[in-house]
Image: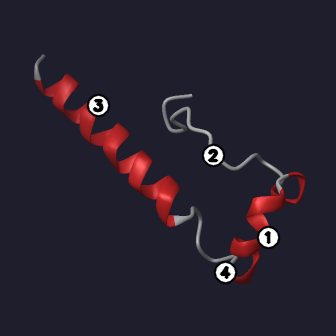
Amino acid sequence: MDSHPPSPTSQPSSPRSDTSSHRYSEVPTEPLPPSELRVFNEHMTRRKHFLSDF
């Protein structure tokens, strides 16, 4: 659950169910779209700051 931050741009397990994911079908080697990576990075950064307090 932690690895997937809640966001409206998060892609489901099956990309075919999402019509907006057809753009990323050209690059199957890319695990996540740039927008999702940015959100994921922000989430991980916040988690690092939170964990560093302990």
Q: Amino acid at mark 4?
A: Val
Residue furthest to the right in view is 17
Q: Quadrant of residue 15?
A: bottom right
**Picture layout, residue 5 above or below residue 15:** above
Q: Is residue 20 left or right of residue 46?
A: right
Whole-number angstrom distance, CA of label 3 to CA of label 4? 29 Å
Name the element at disc 2.
loop
Q: Position of residue 4 (x, y in %)?
A: 55, 38
Q: Which residue is mark 1?
A: 22
Of badges 2 and 4, the one in the foreground is 2
Q: Is residue 50 left or right of residue 4?
A: left
The C terminus, quarter of image: top left
Whole-number angstrom distance, CA of label 1 to CA of label 2? 14 Å
Q: How is the image coloured?
A: secondary structure
Q: Amino acid at mark 2?
A: Ser
Kindly check if marks 3 and 1 are in contact, taking CB atoms under 8 A apart as contact.
no
Q: Which residue is mark 3?
A: 47
**Picture layout, residue 50 above or below residue 18:** above
Q: Dot 4: within a 10 Å radius of its alpha carbon, few (fewer than 14), some, or many (20 or more) residues?
A: few
Q: How many marks?
A: 4
**Picture layout, residue 31 above or below residue 49:** below
Q: Amino acid at mark 1?
A: His
The mark nearer the N terminus, 3 or 1, is 1
The mark nearer the N terminus, 3 or 4, is 4
Q: Amino acid at mark 3?
A: Arg
Name the element at disc 4.
loop
Whole-number angstrom distance, CA of label 4 to CA of label 1? 10 Å
Q: Which residue is mark 2?
A: 10
Whole-number angstrom distance, CA of label 3 to CA of label 1? 31 Å
